[in-house]
């Protein structure tokens, strides 16, 4: 069964109906593991559980604890949200919120740089918007 991304959502092709469907946690876990070139045994060793338990997670036979989800996310270099949610369940604004949570861990000088960058980008956006909203009859300088 192959998976693909469409509009930010991981989809899987059902081999019997040839229709795409959103991937559940078990499929996303297996997909991320394979993308990283890990075996079930290799992933199990990385996060300190048995190969059998990884197999159960990937076959929807068991649900991992929050601690295991955290360790899976770290080992697979993804966010826990990417493991748990379909792409459309978390919107872009939420992903920016998550980035900003990461910024809160920076030292004060690094936070200041990030703040200045964001403010500069927002000012540039506002200026472009104002220029595009100007009436066409007024061709004079800004």
Image (cartoon, rainbow, N blue to C red):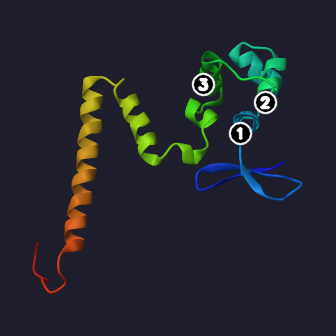
Which residue is label 3 attached to?
74
Residue found at x 29% / y 30%: 110
Q: CA distance from mark 1 to mark 3?
A: 19 Å
**Considering only order in the chain, which callout, 3 or 1, is on the residue closer to the N terminus?**
1
Label 2 SS: loop
- State the image quarter where residue 40 is shown: top right
Residue 79 seen in the figure: no
> Is 21 on the left-hand or right-hand side of 129?
right
Say whether residue 131 is left or right of residue 43: left
Counting residues from the start of the chain, the first of labels 3 and 2 encountered is 2
Instruction: Say the numbered circle drawn on residue 113.
Output: none
Mark nearest the camera among 1 and 3 is 1
Residue that lies at the very extreme toward the right in this rendered image: 16
Give the residue displayed 76% in from the left and 19% down from the top: 44
The correct choice, above or below, for 50 with respect to 102 in the image is above
Residue 56 visible in this rendered orientation of the protein: yes
Badge 1 is on which residue? 24
In the rendered structure, are the residues bearing label 2 and label 1 in contact, judged by CB atoms less than 8 Å apart?
yes
SS of the residue under disc 3: helix
Secondary structure, mark 1, is: loop
Q: Residue 129 location, x and y as percent?
A: 24, 65
| Residue on which disc 2 sits | 60
Q: Residue at x 62, y 33 (%)?
A: 84
């Amino acid at each position: 069964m192959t998976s693909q991304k469409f509009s930010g959502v991981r989809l899987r092709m059902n081999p019997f109906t040839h229709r795409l469907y959103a991937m559940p946690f078990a499929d996303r876990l297996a997909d991320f593991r394979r993308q990283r070139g890990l075996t079930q045994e290799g992933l199990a060793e990385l996060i300190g559980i048995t190969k059998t338990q990884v197999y159960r997670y990937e076959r929807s036979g068991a649900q991992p604890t929050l601690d295991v989800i955290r360790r899976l996310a770290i080992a697979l270099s993804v966010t826990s949200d990417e493991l748990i949610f379909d792409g459309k369940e978390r919107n872009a604004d939420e992903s920016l919120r998550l980035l900003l949570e990461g910024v809160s861990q920076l030292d004060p000088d690094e936070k200041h740089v990030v703040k200045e960058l964001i403010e500069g980008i927002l000012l540039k956006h506002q200026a472009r918007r104002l220029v595009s909203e100007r009436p066409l009859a007024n061709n004079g300088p800004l």
